[in-house]
Amino acid sequence: MFEDRTGKRVPQVIFHTRQGSEWVDVTTDQLFAGKTVAVFSLPGAYTPTCSSSHVPRYNKLAPALKAHGVDTVACVSVNDTFVMNAWQKDERADAITFIPDGNGDFTAGMGLLVDKDDLGFGKRSWRYSMLVRDGVIEKMFIEPDLPGDPFQVSDADTMLAYLAPDAPKPLDATVFTREGCPFCAKAKAALHDAGIVFEELVLNRDYTDQTLRAVAKASSVPQVFINGEHIGGSDKVAEWLAKR
């Protein structure tokens, strides 16, 4: 079993980061003192669950977390700063601060440095998350000590539910568009005015008409999807918004 360090201070370490072309040492106090920080730590950059689920969802929910008092959302991994910087860029995770714990000092201080030699990883972090206020751990969500890489409680939705149990979750919206389409512009403007953040996929850049027919059973754009529901074009979006 891993120790739940709720009520204790985070370890005092120095993170060696690369910012632009300069080496910048960042201390624990610089990250945590006087701030509320939602931290999630994971086994490694570019690994499947970390890249497909853990980081993207925290990046998506970062505005909601910050709306409920979080100053910084931080991702910690036992990787060097060059890997973490490249991973953040590839993930387009600008809402998250990526913390390189290259030597594992912070993770060891948390008592969560584990042996991943069987995978050729060496020492890595066990997956967990925590809410830290002014350097003191208020709440920890540690994945159960089970074989493999369990991912049950350290997710962003669990963190948001702890902070604000009644807070509505942001909608997941995607808009299929094409360049120069006035109806696409109309649908995007309506979603923007309603405060709905969406991902835009552009024809012949991000998808082809074959994908559109396969997904939406349509050949015209825009096609809007929200929380898995096919809304349709700009007029259907206006109708859907009017019913909210």
Image (cartoon, helix red, strand yellow):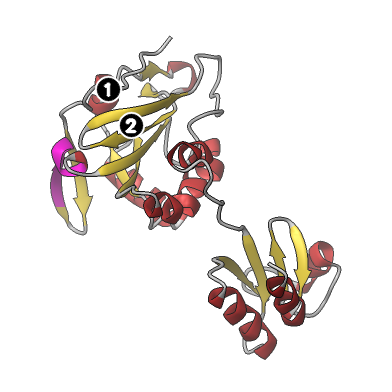
Please, what is the three-letter code of the amino acid marked with disc 2? Val
Q: Position of residue 61 (x, y in %)?
A: 48, 51
Please name whichever residue, 125 or 204, is drawn nearer the observer in this view of the structure.
Answer: 125
Q: Which residues are magenta?
A: 23-31
Residue linked to disc 2:
78
Disc 1 is placed on an element classified as: loop
Whether 24 is among the magenta residues is yes
Please report the residue visible at 37 percent of the width from the left and 52 percent of the height from the top: 66
Q: Foreground mark, 1 or 2?
A: 1
- Location of residue 220 by image quarter: bottom right
Q: Position of residue 223 (x, y in %)?
A: 74, 73
Q: State which quarter of the image contains the N terminus.
A: top left
Disc 2 is placed on an element classified as: loop
Please report the residue visible at 69 percent of the width from the left and 86 percent of the height from the top: 183
In the image, taking residue 183 as reference, residue 55 lies left or right, namely left
Whether 206 is among the magenta residues is no
In the image, taking residue 79 as reference, residue 156 lies left or right, namely right
Please name whichever residue, 183 or 107, is drawn nearer the observer in this view of the structure.
Answer: 183
Instruction: Give the spatial CA distance, label 1 vs label 2.
Output: 24 Å
Residue at the far top: name it: 1
For disc 1, the neighbor class at 10 Å (few under 14, some 14 to 19, many from 20) is some
Please report the residue visible at 33 percent of the width from the left and 50 percent of the height from the top: 85
In the image, taking residue 125 as reference, residue 104 lies left or right, namely left
**Going from the N terminus, do you reach mark 1 or mark 2 first?**
1
- Disc on res. 7: 1
For disc 2, the neighbor class at 10 Å (few under 14, some 14 to 19, many from 20) is many
Please, what is the three-letter code of the amino acid marked with disc 1? Gly
Q: Position of residue 112 (x, y in %)?
A: 35, 19
Q: How many marks?
A: 2
